[in-house]
Image (tube, helix red, strand yellow):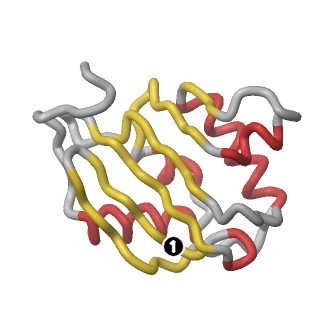
């Protein structure tokens, strides 16, 4: 599979995916969150490098990502996302939302042929204060 573009990607309706994803996060329901992703998903985030003391800024696999997110949910028990907008393009969706400390966040999700996320990248303001 070409990781940069898949003409056969099954992209869910943007509003539907965003609502499901944000509802799962706001419920702090890790199994529901993870259900959006393939087993071999890759997550890119500048926060990963910060948490890992400057090491790689990505995680591979639902298991590693589950551990990372479980720690985040524990650290931020009042975590709540608010949807600002969604954008769709090619084989991906972008969700723009308010996240940790009400900072704006953009997250791009690339989908596979089964409509599951196989790669995702998170973007924060440069002055991120987490």
Location of the N terminus (image quadrant): top left
The residue carrying pointer 1 sits among few (fewer than 14), some (14 to 19) or many (20 or more) residues within 10 Å by Cα, namely many
Left or right? Give the position of 55 relative to 91.
right
Residue 47 lies, with reference to residue 61, above or below; the image says: below
Q: Give percent across and percent down for residue 73.
A: 73, 57
Q: Which residue corresponds to mark 1?
A: 97
Left or right? Give the position of 111 relative to 122.
left
Residue lying at 82% horizontally and 41% vertically, measured from the top left: 51
Q: Give percent across and percent down for residue 42.
A: 50, 31
Local SS, label 1: strand
Location of the C terminus (image quadrant): bottom right
Residue lying at 46% horizontally and 43% vertically, measured from the top left: 120
Residue 97 lies, with reference to residue 47, above or below; the image says: below
Identify the residue at the far front of this view. 126
Left or right? Give the position of 60 relative to 49.
left
Foreground pick, 93 / 27:
93
Q: Give percent across and percent down for residue 63.
A: 60, 29
Residue lying at 11% horizontally and 34% vertically, measured from the top left: 8
Residue lying at 62% horizontally and 62% vertically, measured from the top left: 28
């Amino acid at each position: 599979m070409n990781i940069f573009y898949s003409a056969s990607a099954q992209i869910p309706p943007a509003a539907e995916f965003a609502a499901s994803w944000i509802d799962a996060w706001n419920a702090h329901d890790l199994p529901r969150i993870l259900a959006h992703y393939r087993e071999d998903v890759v997550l890119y985030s500048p926060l990963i490098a910060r948490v890992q003391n400057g090491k790689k800024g990505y995680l591979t696999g639902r298991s590693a990502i589950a551990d990372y997110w479980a720690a985040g949910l524990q650290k931020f028990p009042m975590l709540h996302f608010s949807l600002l907008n969604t954008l769709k393009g090619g084989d991906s969706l972008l969700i723009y939302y308010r996240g940790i400390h009400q900072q704006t966040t953009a997250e791009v999700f690339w989908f596979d042929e089964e409509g599951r996320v196989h790669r995702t990248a998170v973007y924060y303001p440069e002055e991120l204060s987490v």
